[in-house]
Image (cartoon, rainbow, N blue to C red):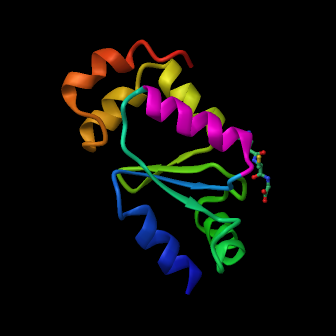
Amino acid sequence: MALPKAKEIADSAPVVIFSKTYCSYCATVKRLLKELGASFKVIELNVEDDGSEMQSALAQWTGQRTVPNVFIGGKHIGGCDATIALHGGGKLVPLLTEVGAVAKAETSRGAKASI
Ligand SMILES: N[C@@H](CCC(=O)N[C@@H](CS)C(=O)NCC(=O)O)C(=O)O
């Protein structure tokens, strides 16, 4: 049950972050996306009743057990390092724009994000 649910959630918004409330890597990704003006959905696995089942399902599906586990446009991106690398390579904002997580007018502001 957890795998179909995780897949459905990953597809339910342009950007989805499977996270834990106390995770500093998760906080970094959330901060970066906020700075870029992007909307995103967060699932805090440590407060969900079936969070550990979903984490195992995500590991089985994506090969990644850690959080943050980031999806953009339903596609698995990776964790904090992968998200920051995408931004460093100039590919994150275009991707966020493409999926409608950030308005085109906001992309120039996003380019100034500190991370
Ligand atoms: N290099 C990883 C680090 C992620 C990481 O270590 N996350 C910790 C939480 S802060 C984790 O998922 N630990 C295992 C767990 O909570 O089950 C990334 O870039 O996302």
User: Residue shown at 68%/77% (left/top)?
Assistant: 53
Position of residue 89 in the picture relative to residue 22 (left or right):
left
Based on the displayed image, in which of its 4 quarters is residue 52 positioned?
bottom right
Q: Is residue 33 rendered magenta in the image? A: yes
What residue appears at the point 57 percent right and 37 percent down from the top-left corner? 29
Q: Position of residue 61 (x, y in %)?
A: 58, 67
Image quadrant occupied by the N terminus: bottom right
Quarter of the image where one finds residue 39? top left
Q: Quadrant of the C terminus?
A: top right
Residue at the image position 55 percent from the left and 77 percent from the top? 3
In the rendered structure, the answer to whether residue 30 lies left or right of residue 11 reads right
Establish if 108 lies above or below 10: above
Main SS, magenta residues: helix
Instruction: Estimate the x, y position of residue 45 in percent, counting from the top left.
Output: 65, 65
Q: Does the magenta stretch include residue 24?
A: yes
Residue positioned 67% across, 68% down in the render: 47
Q: Tell me which segment is drawn in magenta.
A: 22-35
Q: Where is residue 104 in the image (x, y as percent from the top left)?
A: 20, 27
Which residue sits furthest top?
A: 112
